[in-house]
């Protein structure tokens, strides 16, 4: 994926000017100058401050205009009110990229937001790309380039790129990494993202040969669909891990349907990440546990893991953790068991997990590891090394590293302890072998490797587009309606126009008319109150099923009118909708809503009245791909049950998928539809029928 | 709770003899001797080895008989075949407590198991209590006493007791603790538990004044109910945390009911821990994260947390994590907000999380913390300290520690980083303030404090016993039956004898008899095939509901006989059971099974045919307490729905609870019942009916 050339100066500038450089070592404006100079940045370094003078053996220019060539990146750390003027001067000086480190913008309120908008206007006028404001800048450990004001030493170098919406998280994770044995290729603090957003930087960071994995700390996303597109392209080349925070801040929204009530913004993020192939971590430790493994290990061919341990307890823990992470213990071939038998004492366990006993020597570790890796039924291995009763862990590390280094299968290490394992920790980190303190974390990392391998193995599918739809009819219905809730008959006509099967429906306004209509349709029939004001009809006695003859229909009409009017005296009631009963079949719900970040989100799950109680639901971005439709079915009981279960007859999964595709497209074609939900869809052995529909404009 | 006096010598011996002490520094028999001497153990230290000589300035006796007074604890580390003889000699010497560190027993197979049994026989004969074999011994950091062979330095001292079934886990966790800032009061490696089990030691460890929290690493439990009893008593005094591993090893068992299929041994552990007040961790890091907080913090009065941060990002992460852990962000009183406004710059956020901005001084941290802790609407606080742009974290720690120290509310710290935070880490650990690297882990620890406080606030309830049952009838039915599956009529009679309402049921053997019976009962009726060989009747067309008249009954009889015989040609068919239809009502399932560790386990949940698909179920030990019954209802949709939901009418929760109690007691009174399940129980507005029952003898 090509990146935007206007962003190039951020990572490969010819010259950098620090605006707001300070001679005072307690000021952040000194910190940036010091870091940039000490980083060993090979380009030109310039300082600007109204005070003038010299700093780190360089002149401080009084004005931006006075800065000599080459200069193509400005780092601005001056009080917020002065930033717009400085930006304009940068533009006049020909600088086309600026990092605004200063705070005091949108994050402090309306006045700051106006200042930020002003900066963006000036930047646009001069074709300047902006990172920030309110950020701690950029780090490239390989150019090298350091425009942050973080206290020394410089954050450790490595092969993980980190893009974060929070500067404090950059500082915290950066320092934490020092104790964790991984390092950064590039680090970007994005700040308020007045201009450049995380999405813009993905291709640029992926193109960096020193970056093997991209990690994201996200508090939100600017343009959801653009992010999905960019991330999906990028993730085919390099793995992307994301930690998305701000769940509790997602807020409440009005919802007229189950789908609306259930489709929180977190479901939309999950659906978006799934489509993009972005691996979602639930906390920072997890994200970098996984990043290490993705950066350093080959991908496995399957989910079968060999476990080598020198004690039973950690082996049991590992077996539990592998199972919990969806991996399996490999079954060894007879030759493997024979080789292990020769290598180990009789009391050792040569079943997986292989317990080599406490006496296991470094050579036994290495030889047994080689043997299990050679087994074609083994896709990856976990090595467990508790603190040694007999041998130093350092010696074990030295013995196994050559085996791991030459293996084409991933090996992760559970190196348990602290003081006693330091030498082994150092060896493994130097050799880029992922080591974790406990088998649980090692197992989770192996699972992510499998997840990545499986995602790459599946070809990227395009969302399904269908042509056999009748847009004009829907257009006409929507144009003719001034209501926020459409009558059932109109909703049914819209579904029909999009090829979604709907049983015949007819409005009746009197008991006689209802009985007559039912007679024409054939008994039994269903009767539902027709009212734009009543969303959940069955709650107020507005649904009667299985009416068997004309008398029953007439009686039900009267009862329903009385009952609904009593429950809802304000409601406009247009009469009742009569439909033939679709008996039998499984009940599912299919709905679609608009997420503010990611647009259309489809929901599928167990239908009926208990949707929100059972919460047997799955989400995907709409329009969906074939894979996503299948995943929605597989990940819900409602979907699995379509295959038949005990005396529940199998239902037509293809017909369900077809409705998912068509409802998604209906919503995509008509942005004025805020929510549409079919509940239930009744799924028969052949075909599926939309029984009850609601929509919000 | 009083502990067993025979166990006293393990922790307060007058004199210890090491049998198998070695002069060779590479041998474990040297390691034990060295550790015991270097530990500073104040009692007498003796060595025994057939080789004789001296070791660490003490004589090595050739025989156990030669060991002088005082000696009341033996530590045995000699080859397994020699252990029984040594044990006998210990007995003759008057030693009544022994730790067998040697391996080569049950863990290596049948021969070893026999050797272990022999050791136990000898121990019983001489009234010797045994820890081990196949363990690494005992550590008491305060007596002090160290009988392990772990390489020096000695494991760090502290206030957490650790009992573990795995020696390697003891070694690993012990070493890991050195880097984590917590330490041990007592550590026991339990090994094969030939005699002394984790349950026996709970009271002894709880009585130790240096122990504030008890942590358990469990691979199983010997006597489940004894453990629950001991743990429940102990947990009233001191918190118990458990990590239970070996999930995947729990294996499969034959099951004739949904309850049997769903009630895995992990559900039984969960139910047991819940009753005992044992807090279950899912991994080692979690267990000790929580142990630190429980050891060092006062308990909170509620779940409202104040968060203090100097940056937005970590505050958002904290808010998410608190919500995910069932805690809430406290709402500050107006006075609190006023005070914060005075203490902080205008751009700071004085809403919770309080963002004091990057410029926050140590004094601001301390003062703001005092202010939020003084708010009566705040139950606990989380302090977030990323690496400092302006102030050293050490200074922040020094400023806040006095506030935390004098507070009656718990305060935990998210101290983010590594190198930059070392000084603060040291201060907080010295002051026993729990610090975590990330807000997520700090939030989980706060949640555990709340969980503990809430458990202590609830009075311990006794399981409910009922008297109005007719044991004789059930006894007679069971005595008369030789089948593994009882006929419905007998099962119904058994339920009736235990006060569980069952609709009338009558067996009919011909179509005419069925129609006649139905006529007498009144229509509509249900018909079910009566067969001891068919467990899930509806799967084979063996259930017909809502039969409205005699003709329908007669027709259904014929169809059912044909259909069932076709599906199950081998089945013995006794006829059909006729029952009046109990229409309406909610369907729930109530079942009980026997767990090999914990005995009777009750299940409650969403009933019908989809039980195993929906998995809306909860478990509790039977007989249950009132609280447990309520918790089962609250933790399932089936139970919550009994309160009414939309047009689903409310059901009689009391009647459901009553069936839970009575079914549990029926199973408790008749151990020959392996499983009983009622599915569905039909819950009406008043009362609940057992509709279909199955049992396994």
Image (spheres, coloured by chain):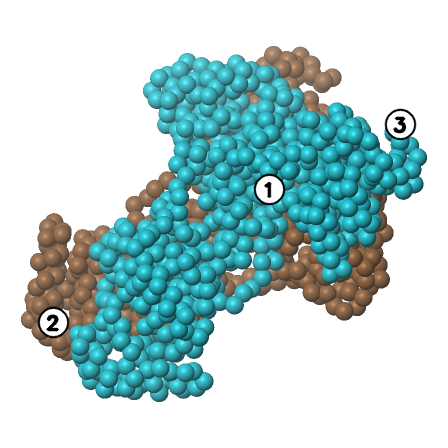
Chain colours: A brown, B cyan
Query: Which residue appears at 23% of the width and 86% of the height?
Result: B512
Position of residue B501 in the picture relative to residue B80 (left or right): left
Chain letter belonging to callout 2: A
Toward which corner of the image does residue A19 lie, by quadrant?
top right
Q: Is residue B136 above or below residue B262?
A: above
Q: Is residue B284 above or below residue B383?
A: below
Badge 2 element: helix
Position of residue A383 in the picture relative to residue A508 (left or right): right
Residue located beneath label 3 in the image: B57
The one nearer the camera, B596 or B617, is B596
Q: Are marks 2 and 3 on the same chain?
A: no
Nearer the observer: mark 2 or 1; the answer is: 1
Q: Are marks 2 and 1 on the same chain?
A: no
Nearer the observer: mark 2 or 3; the answer is: 3
Residue located beneath label 1 in the image: B200
- Give the x, y percent position of residue A497: 30, 68
* Alpha carbon separation for disc pair 2 and 3: 104 Å
Callout 2 touching callout 3 (CB < 8 Å): no
């Amino acid at each position: 994926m090509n990146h935007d050339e206007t962003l190039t100066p951020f990572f490969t500038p010819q010259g950098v000017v620090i605006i707001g450089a300070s001679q005072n070592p307690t000021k952040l404006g000194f910190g940036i100058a010091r870091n940039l100079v000490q980083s060993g940045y090979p380009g030109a370094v310039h300082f600007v401050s109204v005070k003038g003078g010299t700093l780190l053996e360089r002149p401080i220019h009084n004005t931006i205009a006075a800065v000599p060539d080459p200069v193509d990146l400005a780092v601005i750390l001056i009080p917020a009110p002065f930033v717009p003027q400085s930006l304009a001067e940068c533009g006049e000086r020909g600088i086309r990229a600026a990092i605004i480190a200063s705070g005091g913008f949108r994050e402090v309120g309306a006045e700051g937001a106006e200042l930020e908008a002003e900066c963006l206007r000036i930047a646009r006028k001069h074709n300047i790309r902006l990172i920030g404001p309110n950020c701690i800048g950029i780090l490239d450990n390989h150019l090298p380039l350091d425009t942050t004001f973080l206290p020394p030493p410089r954050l450790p170098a490595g092969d993980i790129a980190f893009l974060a919406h929070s500067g404090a998280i950059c500082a915290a994770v950066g320092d934490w990494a020092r104790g964790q044995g991984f390092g950064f290729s590039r680090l970007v603090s994005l700040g308020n993202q007045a201009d450049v957003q995380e999405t813009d930087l993905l291709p640029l960071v992926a193109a960096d040969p020193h970056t093997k994995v991209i990690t994201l700390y996200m508090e939100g996303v600017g343009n959801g669909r653009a992010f999905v597109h960019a991330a999906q392209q990028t993730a085919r080349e390099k793995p992307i891990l994301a930690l998305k925070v701000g769940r509790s801040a997602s807020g409440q929204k009005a919802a007229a349907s189950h789908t609306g009530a259930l489709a929180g913004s977190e479901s939309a993020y999950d659906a978006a990440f799934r489509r993009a192939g972005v691996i979602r971590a639930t906390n920072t430790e997890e994200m970098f546990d996984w990043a290490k493994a993705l950066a350093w290990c080959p991908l496995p061919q399957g989910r079968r893991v060999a476990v080598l341990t020198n004690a039973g307890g950690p082996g049991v823990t590992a077996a539990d953790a592998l199972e919990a992470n969806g991996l399996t213990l490999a079954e060894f071939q007879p030759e493997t068991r024979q080789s292990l038998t020769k290598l180990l004492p009789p009391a050792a366990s040569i079943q997986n997990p292989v317990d080599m006993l406490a006496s296991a020597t470094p050579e036994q570790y290495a030889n047994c590891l080689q043997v299990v890796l050679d087994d074609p039924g083994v896709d990856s291995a976990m090595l467990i090394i508790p603190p040694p009763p007999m041998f130093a862990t350092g010696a074990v590390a030295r013995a196994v590293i050559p085996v791991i280094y030459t293996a084409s299968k991933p090996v992760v290490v559970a190196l348990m302890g602290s003081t006693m394992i330091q030498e082994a920790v150092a060896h493994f980190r130097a050799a880029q072998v992922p080591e974790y303190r406990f088998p649980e974390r090692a197992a989770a990392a192996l699972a992510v490797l499998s997840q990545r391998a499986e995602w790459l193995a599946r070809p990227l599918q395009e969302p399904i587009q269908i042509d056999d739809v009748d847009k004009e009819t829907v257009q006409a219905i929507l144009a003719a309606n001034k209501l926020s809730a459409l009558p059932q008959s109109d909703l049914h006509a819209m579904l029909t126009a999009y090829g979604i099967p709907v049983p015949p429906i007819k409005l009746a306004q009197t008991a006689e008319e209802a009985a007559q209509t039912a007679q024409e349709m054939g008994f039994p029939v269903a009767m539902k109150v027709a009212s734009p004001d009543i969303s959940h009809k069955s709650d107020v006695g507005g649904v009667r099923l299985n009416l068997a003859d004309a008398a029953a229909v007439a009686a039900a009409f009267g009862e329903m009118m009385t009952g609904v009017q009593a429950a809802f005296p304000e409601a406009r009631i247009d009469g009742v909708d009569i439909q033939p009963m679709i008996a039998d079949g499984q009940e599912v719900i299919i709905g679609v809503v608009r997420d503010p970040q990611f647009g259309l989100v489809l929901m599928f799950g167990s239908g009926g009245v208990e949707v929100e109680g059972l919460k047997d639901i799955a989400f995907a971005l709409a329009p969906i791909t074939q894979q996503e439709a299948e995943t929605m079915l597989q990940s819900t009981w409602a979907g699995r049950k379509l295959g038949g279960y005990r005396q529940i007859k199998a239902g037509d999964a293809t017909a369900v998928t077809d409705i998912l595709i068509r409802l998604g497209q209906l919503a995509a074609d008509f942005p004025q539809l805020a929510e549409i939900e079919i509940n239930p869809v009744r799924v028969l052995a052949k075909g599926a029928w939309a029984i009850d529909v609601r929509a919000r404009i």
